[in-house]
Image (cartoon, grey):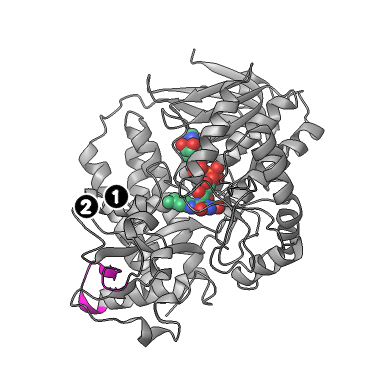
Amino acid sequence: MSERHYCDLLIIGSGIAGLSAAISARDAGLDVIVISKESDIRESNTCHAQGGIVCQGEDDSPELLTRDVVEAGDGISNPEAVRVLASEGPIAVEEFLIKKVHVPFARTEAGRFEYAQEGNHSRRRILHAMDRTGKAIEESLVARLSAMKDIRVFPGYTAIDLLTLPHHSRSPLSLYEEPTCIGAYVLNNRTEKVERIFSCCTILATGGLGRIYQHTTNPHCATGDGYAMAARAGARLINMEYVQFHPTTLFHKDADGFLISEAVRGEGGRLTTKDGSHFMEKYSPLGDLAPRDEVCRAMYEEMIKRGDSYVYLDIAGFARIDLKKRFPEIYGKCLSLGINMAKEPIPVVPAAHYSCGGVHVDVWGRTSLKNLYAAGEVSATGLHGANRLASTSLLEGLVWGLRSVRHIGEHLLREKSYKESDIPEWIYPDQEDESDPALIHQDWVSIKSTMWNYVGIIRTEKRLERATADLRYLSNRIDDFYRKSHLNPMIVSLRNGVQTAFLVASAAFRNRKSRGTHYIA
Ligand SMILES: Cc1cc2nc3c(=O)[nH]c(=O)nc-3n(C[C@H](O)[C@H](O)[C@H](O)COP(=O)(O)OP(=O)(O)OC[C@H]3O[C@@H](n4cnc5c(N)ncnc54)[C@H](O)[C@@H]3O)c2cc1C
């Protein structure tokens, strides 16, 4: 018999949403299991976040934050979610991240917190730990978690599918029950065997989907697993077409989506084509300081028109400051790849950065599937509407991680509505094929280039039609491959990646109105 585990609460994912939920759930006396598909639980989008997390600045108020979030969301932010974030967010940062978890946010010489300013924020309200905010948060959460007793953390466990009733039950009577999540089938990456985790409630905190695009700022784990798992389980997803792109990531084979902060343009950096011509004035009266979306579209148009794979960001000729001092990370990274930004332009390309849509949840993190909650980037509270205000995503993960646990703690029922013997172990194929890494690699190339070229920064009806057709075909092929192969984490991610890509492409195809990050030419 394969391994089985039992808990009150299963948390899938160990970024800010998953770990805040885990710590508060354990504090509330729940029996918790946390799994992460990475062998180092810190690896997550959270750990790569640079700028900071929204709090309440000195001359700030929840009303001002609400106004900024709604403006960024282009008119379709969920007012209830914005109200919750604006009123509870700063308190959660203070009570949980600062007092309980002791995140070392930057302070002024006088010992007060240092609030940074970011684009489209009407106040200085961003707490940060220089340009390593995510790492500081993630490491503090992991330190707190490690100091807690009686919490089970399983690194190197990849969730394959949510266990649901009636779908996974052998009992015909389950059909009359409300569809319910009762845990997950998970792959132990080391043994390559599938285990079952039975839970009273489950929080999906699997982060984003950037890796379904050719260019992205997201780390390897962001293959969109949670969206695909939730969709297969029958949960409702919304706003999947709204994928935010970041204009400037370093274009280099070894840069792996390294972000070049917008502050470089703020300090005078200018975008040019490969032959050195400035182009932003043609697209916006604000030139190089136009909003993110406009800059991304202009860069993309120039690249397509000229058949170039990148443009340049030139600060060498314009900077009035010491670049090494002002941008130590960026300067160091560029130099390590042979680019001296003080002397030459930096090759850059826009990249997929953040998914505004996802698994629909209410203000308590409840999805449409009973006993399944979602928090963080995989979820769609509606906060971001059609576009995200910078530095609100870490805060959203924190607030909904904590609120989900509050709701679970108040409503937990430990009696089971099913017999465990009705829930089968994982069924392996009679004859398993070895998975061919060349096939996996090529399938990823197809997914990423389809998403980049047809479901990227500028979309058209024809491109989206082609994308949905191609991805549907690819998804069927990959599903067949998945069913016949010996399971490993790479195949699980590939299957999720193609299904999530299809979800984004088909949502974009259905929505003919340009809004926020979704632009149809
Ligand atoms: C370069 C970069 C800079 C950013 N800067 C900022 C910023 O300054 N401010 C801000 O607010 N936001 C920023 N963001 C966005 C922000 O980091 C993310 O939205 C946020 O961290 C998401 O947190 P999360 O807990 O939802 O998911 P993540 O932190 O991504 O965690 C997801 C977890 O799920 C696990 N997982 C995934 N699939 C599975 C599976 N099948 N089985 C088991 N485990 C799984 C992963 O291993 C990981 O542990 C940035 C993002 C990037 C990439």
Residue 374 visible (yes or no): yes
Taking 321 as reference, is 224 left or right? right
Q: Residue at x 49, y 22 (%)?
A: 195
Please check the rendered image and state whether residue 317 is part of the magenta-colored stretch, yes or no: yes
Q: Look at mark 2 in the image and give the residue it sits on.
A: 253
Q: Which residues are magenta?
A: 305-318
- Front-lying residue, 223 or 63: 63
Which quadrant holds residue 460?
bottom left
Give the tally of numbered discs: 2
Query: Percent position (x, y) of residue 42?
Result: 47, 34
Q: Look at mark 1 in the image and give the residue it sits on.
A: 332
Taking 509 as reference, is 216 left or right? left
Residue 459 visible (yes or no): no
Count residues near mark 1 (Cα–Cα under 10 Å), then give few for <14, some for 14-19, many for 20+.
some
Query: Percent position (x, y) of residue 412?
Result: 77, 30
Mark 1 and mark 2 lie on one chain; the one further toward the N terminus is: 2
Considering every residue shown, the one lying at the far top of the view is 1
Question: Disc 1 residue type?
Answer: Gly
Q: Residue at x 57, y 44 (%)?
A: 105
Question: Disc 2 residue type?
Answer: Lys
- Front-lying residue, 411 or 464: 411
